[in-house]
Image: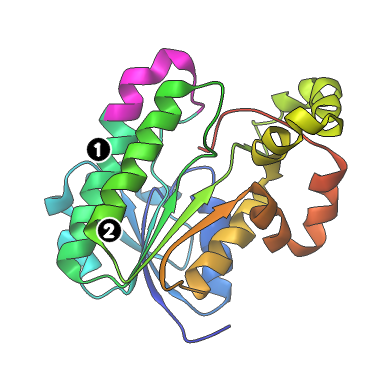
């Protein structure tokens, strides 16, 4: 691990944030977590709490100013096609707000939890995340990392097990293999490990971390994910 980093996390009280933040703290990083009013108790112990609105850069921009890394994990919980309007109003809008706050504060590394793309399903969800990526690229941070999982398996997120037989077949066929791997499932442990790795190893310019790289970052947990090829469409 390199030097300790000062990290501002938007979306840190959710499914993935509560798995990744304790790892960052154990590795000696200073973590500041944005929480909406009423969610303060969901901030992992050891992290500093910043009360604000993820859709309003002005409500938290000052707290970003002393940080070198901004980790953006905000997203609609349990995405589905019925939530298309929320993807633009929450996922995309919050990415823009964090991007504006980070740029204003002089953040050197922006880490964005995006989604695997292209994809044959969840088009509104994928579009909102792709537009978020495009907006952040335009801000030209010294370092930008986009992590692109498809579905993160963990507590309350296990239904893709039902798709194992068909998904396994897709990996065997040459004409569907690449898509099956790009849209493979990762575990919550792998996702948390990949986020820590991204934070500790800023790229020069823009880096994309896809499913195979997320699995590799999981270390000993990677064999488990390679054994099974899952699909889904949720990262939050």
- Label 2 or label 1, whichever lies nearer to me, is 1
Q: Nearer the viewer, residue 191 or 38?
A: 191
Spot the residue most to the bottom. Answer: 3
Where residue 61 appears, x then y in whole percent? 17, 60
Mark 2–mark 1 Cα distance, whole angstroms, equals 19 Å
**For residue 24, side relative to residue 187 (left or right):** left
Magenta span: chief secondary structure: helix
Q: Which residues are magenta?
A: 78-88
Where residue 159 appears, x then y in whole percent? 71, 24
Q: Which residue is under mark 2?
A: 50
Residue 85 in magenta stretch: yes
Spot the residue most to the left. Answer: 58
Where residue 173 appears, x then y in whole percent? 84, 29
Question: Which disc is residue 93 wearing?
Answer: 1
**For residue 102, side relative to residue 151 (left or right):** left
**For residue 227, side relative to residue 31 (left or right):** right
């Amino acid at each position: 691990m390199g030097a300790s980093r000062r990290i501002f996390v938007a979306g840190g009280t959710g499914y993935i944030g509560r798995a990744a933040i304790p790892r960052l703290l154990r590795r000696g990083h200073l973590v500041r977590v944005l929480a909406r009013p009423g969610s303060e108790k969901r901030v992992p112990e050891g992290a500093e709490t910043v009360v604000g609105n993820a859709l309003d850069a002005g409500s938290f921009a000052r707290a970003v100013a002393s940080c070198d890394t901004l980790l953006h994990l905000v997203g609609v919980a349990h995405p589905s096609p019925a939530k298309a309007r929320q993807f633009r109003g929450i996922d995309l809008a919050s990415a823009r707000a964090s991007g504006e706050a980070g740029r204003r504060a002089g953040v050197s590394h922006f880490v964005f939890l995006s989604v695997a793309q292209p994809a044959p399903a969840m088009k509104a969800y994928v579009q909102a995340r792709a537009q978020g990526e495009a907006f952040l690229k335009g801000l030209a941070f010294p370092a930008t990392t986009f992590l692109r999982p498809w579905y993160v398996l963990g507590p309350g997120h296990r239904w893709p097990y039902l798709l194992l037989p068909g998904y396994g077949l897709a990996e065997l066929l040459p004409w569907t293999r690449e898509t099956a791997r790009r849209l493979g499932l990762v575990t919550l442990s792998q996702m948390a490990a990949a986020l820590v790795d991204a934070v500790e190893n800023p790229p020069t310019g823009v880096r994309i971390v896809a499913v195979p790289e997320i699995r590799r970052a999981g270390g000993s947990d990677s064999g488990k994910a390679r054994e099974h090829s899952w699909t889904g469409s949720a990262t939050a």
